[in-house]
Image (cartoon, grey):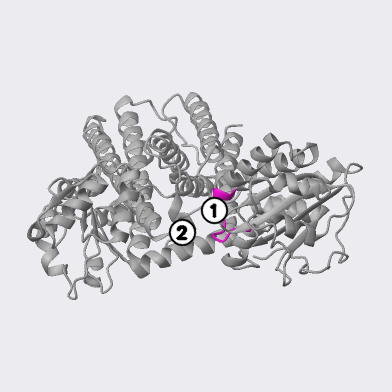
Amino acid sequence: MDRQLLIVSTVCFLAAIGRTIVALRAGIFRPGRFNFLSIGLGFIFQTAFLSIRGHTLGRCPLTNLFEVFIFLAWSVALIYMLVGPAYRLSLMGAFTAPLVVLLQGFALIAPIDIRHPVKLLANAWLEFHASISLVAYGAFALACIAAAMYLVQERQLKTHQLHSIFSHLAPLTDLFAAITRLLWWGFALYTVGLASGFFVGQPLPYVQVVCAFGVWLLYAAILQGRHLRRLAPKHVAALCIVGFSAAVALLWGITFTAQMPSLP
Amino acid sequence: MNLFCVGLSHHTADVETRERFAGHAETDCILRGAGCTEALLLATCNRVEVYAASEKRVSTDEIARCLARNIENGRSEYAPPFYRYEDEKCVQHLFCVTSGLDSMVVGESEIFGQAKKAYESARKSGSAGPCLHRLFQRAFRVAKQVRTHTEITRGSVSVGSVAVDLAQRIFGQLSSCKVLVLGAGETSERTARALVSRGVADLRVSNRSTDRAQELAQRVGGRAVRFDEWLQQCREIDILITSTSSETVLLTPESLAPMLRNRVDRPLFVIDIAVPRDVDPSVNKMHGVYLYDIDSLQSVAEQSLALRREQISVAEEIIAEHVADFGKSVSGKLNYKTPSTEHRALGETPLHTSEL
């Protein structure tokens, strides 16, 4: 039953992608209600899935790689729902939906939904640490998407080649403001998530801690460079993509190398 | 009842010919006297067209005589390039006209307002009856649908509007942007005015002649800046419009770099409309600087026009549906038949289904 909810959710996100592709091919893309509504609907089904899974497990559904992927996709959709309309970044949905489909599609197809042989005990600090960190990842993912949009917009303005998608992207200054805010939100949540990891009551793997601090330092450096105006917006955008790639690599490493009880 | 359209447009006639047949205030009434049950004159700078309904056939020559500005000399000595569309083709042509597909600048929306005005005028004078009422109401509906469901009006197609559009792509709201106009040329004034109309409040003007700078500043609601201070202004401004007659380059990466040191996260949009150019093209390579010269602005305008042209087929599909639907709704009331070549009388050119 819960997997069916996830399939319906994926179909909703696919509908948003399909609508975007058809519209872009016809050269008439207007970021409209359809995309926002289909993503919103997809988000509702994701939430329903996580809720049912959580009730079944009796804890936050972050016990295997499958759940981690779904939670990450949910975080991305959540941040989009909060940020997209507020910043007139509706086209972000065109970039967000494929990322969510990629995460959910992989989770649904790959045989990674393996129930833990032993029922995991609820650990409030561990669940808080994992969930808050994943929401931070969602913010970093959206910052990465906004950064990609910024770089596309910047490139087209520089080269004077203004393609059809150009006219629907948000202005450069708005995109940069969105990147900055998403970075601050992501950084703050990630800091809280990182700090809460020390209260889980279990020894943390040294490599994971070092890598997590590495990612934290990278984002701190980007924000400091931005704050001191040492980094041009284009460089901030490029570093956002590098930062998110590093964060995803770290998440991947954690879920593969760590023991299940200490996920993610 | 026959429904037909006779006219001249930028496709078929030069401005001199269009002027000769531009019609006049009483044209609608004269047309009714010539045998038209209903008549409407649509006269714009690019077209002169009569849309009419009649019980019996009214020749193109008759219409041409009504349209001639000087009635005594109305008899044409040559065959003017009039086109004539009847029934279904007339409906299709009007839908294309009101949707901007037949305009010189494809997708322009001014024609919509002009057609509405012409209809209102004919309605008030009693020249437009139920047949033209139905036709024009549908035409306005079609035009709105074409505008909503296609991108036929997308993009800017003039240098001034492209500059404003690009500024909005970079800065979003222009109300907080600071603009410096360097040189008091006509194009820079037009561009500055376009920016002011989109909300720019802080406008500065600099020119070698302080008097001319002050004059322009007064006209556009800005303030004059001494010419030897303009480079320093680049520390504060967001948009620079240059159009001086200088023979040498005024702005180079070397001169601009120190000005940008403290504004790393604020873009600078440079519009160089001077010929020869005032700004070294390599300025565009600097971080956060977006340089557009007259050629690149025109190229962007061309891209917009090309995109609009791509939308024509989408718009034509919408129009075709409405033409068919309109045909069904008026069947029995009009001789709504496929046009033949029977109208190739004196002064009539072959029918044009589309001149785009």
Q: Is residue A264 magenta?
A: no
Q: Is residue B107 above or below residue A200?
A: below
Determine if marks 2 and 1 fall on one subunit: yes
The image quarter containing residue B342 is bottom right
Along the line of sight, the residue nearer the viewer: A47 or B245: B245
Disc 1 residue crowd, few under 14, some 14–19, many 20+, Cα 10 Å: some
> Which residue is identified by label 2?
B157
Which residue is drawn at the image coordinates 41% and 66% (left, top)?
A: B298
Would you say A88 lies left or right of B211 here?
A: right
> Which residue is identified by label 1?
B108
State yes or no: discs 2 and 1 in contact (Cβ < 8 Å): yes
Q: Which residues are magenta?
A: B102-111
Name the magenta segment's main secondary structure: loop
Q: How many marks?
A: 2
Which residue is drawn at the image coordinates 25% and 41% (left, top)?
A: B201
Residue A135 image position (x, y, % from top left): 35, 36
Q: Is tag 2's residue or tag 1's residue first in the polypeptide sequence?
A: 1
Amino acid found under the numbered disc labelled 1: Glu
Along the line of sight, the residue nearer the viewer: B127 or A55: B127
Q: Residue furthest front?
A: B72
Which residue is drawn at the image coordinates 44% and 53% (left, top)?
A: A167
Residue A149 image position (x, y, % from top left): 38, 52
Residue B6 image position (x, y, % from top left): 74, 57
